[in-house]
Amino acid sequence: MRRAFVAGNWKMNLSLAETRALVEGLKAEVGDETRIDIAVGPPFVYISEAVNAAAGSVIKVAAQDVYFEEKGAFTGEISPGMLGDVGCTYAIVGHSERRHVLGETDALIAKKLKATLDGGLKVILCVGELLEEREAGRTAEVVKTQIVAGLFDLSAEAMANVVIAYEPVWAIGTGVTASPEDANEVHGMIRALLVEKFGDAVAAATTIQYGGSVKPENAETLMGQPEVDGALVGGASLKVDAFVAIIRNTIKAKGLD
Ligand code: PGA
């Protein structure tokens, strides 16, 4: 059965010293927690520091992005091999800020995802609709397009290393969350797509996180939804207490306590 997974996406925040302090703080609180999976997502330049600080604990490190080539003349880019080399376990691809601020397309995201898996890392694929798309009743269509483009060329075996994060763009960093029922509905729709393409076993085994203003106060109700398997957390992952509370509330909501 799929595992619950809480990951932090720090975005472009914190310093070297703050990276160490945050990971050490988490390690002291949840460093040996095995009931769910836990990851932190620092900026590229702090990945090694986070990996070193997390050593000896269950905390894994995720990159916030990755490039699809292994090496060469790609100024400013970082390859899956480089991420693996410094001890990174996951790469996030297709985050809404990459899609909508940096202009990444589904085609580029699909290449990054494939290269990440080929490079031996796990991937967190983010999908989600804009407010105007939701208001126009296009949520299912938009999310389906992103899922099909990102995942439908993969083998069923490759899906073992894929996590999906449903993050409605209008809920990210806004303090507004999807209602637990709306989140559950979209997660169910994503899982139905996985059933169609990869079969029941893969669909049942794939972790689908919710992201968008997840906080200690709303984590338990959101994570209590049957189709919601964890959280991708932005703002609230920057403080030990808040991130630990989200982890503990997820454990509780999933009946793992
Ligand atoms: P937020 O960000 O929790 O600050 O809304 C979530 C995300 O962008 O992954």
Image (tube, helix red, strand yellow):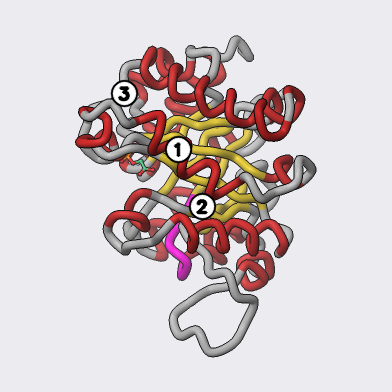
Q: Which amino acid does label 3 sit on?
A: Ala
Q: What is the secondary structure assignment of the residue under circle 3?
A: loop
Ligand 1 lies in quarter: top left
Q: Is residue 96 magenta?
A: no
Tell me if label 1 and label 2 are in contact, CB under 8 Å: yes
Q: Mark 2 points at which residue?
A: 92
Where does the magenta region start and end? 41-45
Q: Which residue is drawn at 47% across and 66% down?
A: 44
Q: Is the residue under label 2 in contact with that under label 3 (CB below 8 Å)?
A: no
Q: Name the residue under label 1.
A: 232
Q: Is residue 93 visible?
A: yes
Instruction: Say which quarter of the image contains residue 227.
Output: top right
Q: Which residue is drawn at 33% across and 34% down?
A: 168
179 relative position to 144: left or right: left
Residue to which mark 3 is pinned = 178
Between residues 82 and 144, which one lies in front from this camera angle? Answer: 144
The residue that appears at 20% across and 36% down in the rendered structure is 132
Can you give x and y, in whole percent of width and height, for residue 131 in the image? 22, 35
